[in-house]
Amino acid sequence: MFRTVVVATLGLTASLAYAQDAEISVANGARIAVIGGCHDCHTANYNEMEGKVDPATALKGNPVGFQGPWGTTYPPNLRIVAASHSEDEFVEYLKTFKARPPMPWYNVHAFSEPEMRSLHQYIVSLGEPGDPAPAYVPPGEKPKSPFAILAPPNMP
Ligand code: HEC
């Protein structure tokens, strides 16, 4: 009897947690942007601010780029990407896009559709898209904006 109750309770808790994950909402989008690591690169000073999301800069891209054998890439302003795609288009885009390093695009492909929709609603809710981040600079060309070097200096 006791065992049946425990098993039933665990099952219910699991399905409630699942229902919460599947819910499409701005709040879930905000959570996904944190646990997906999107702010780490696409929100300026996020790491320096120890994870405090500044609504003025959240997901507006980063003026500091990453340089490696692929050239110099700047995390783009995701508010512009979200504003220029309807929710359905954004889902299609997130399922299929690829980008240069260090963008972990393959991780984004693993999001469920409700997660992608929540992310779109969250990004749109952040407000004015603002200006684009600096453009990609190909290898051998000198960037005009700051960047961190990601290539290991002692590659064999
Ligand atoms: C390690 C840093 C890093 C992380 C973490 C990261 N990004 Fe990026 N992202 C980048 C960079 C750099 C680019 C630009 C790549 C290029 O120029 O090809 C980019 C590009 C993109 C693009 C393409 C934008 C466009 O203009 O077409 C999308 C969409 C994107 N990221 C979404 C996300 C999402 C969603 C997350 C969180 C799940 C995330 N990124 C996490 C660094 C990152």
Image (cartoon, rainbow, N blue to C red):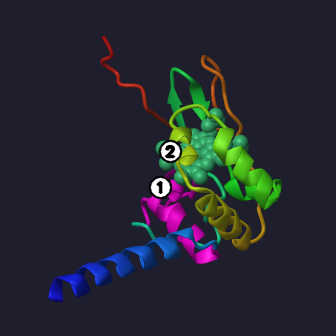
Q: Which residue is mark 2?
A: 107
Q: Give the residue furthest to the top.
A: 156
Numbered disc in front, either 2 or 1: 2
Q: Pointer 2 and pointer 1: residues touching (CB < 8 Å)?
A: yes
The CB of the residue at mark 1 lies under 8 Å from ligand 1: yes
- Quadrant of the snapshot with the C terminus: top left
Q: Give the residue furthest to the front.
A: 1
Task: Give the residue displayed 60% in from the left and 35% down from the top.
Answer: 73
Question: Does residue 79 sit above or below 26 in this rendering?
Answer: above
* CA neighbours of label 1 inside 10 A, class few (<14), some (14 to 19), many (20+): few
Task: Give the residue displayed 48% in from the left and 61% down from the top.
Answer: 46
Q: Which residue is mark 1?
A: 37
Of 92 and 130, nearer the camera is: 92
Residue 117 shown in magenta: no
Q: Quadrant of ligand 1?
A: top right
Of 48 and 21, nearer the camera is: 21
Of 147 and 21, nearer the camera is: 21
Mark 2 residue type:
Asn
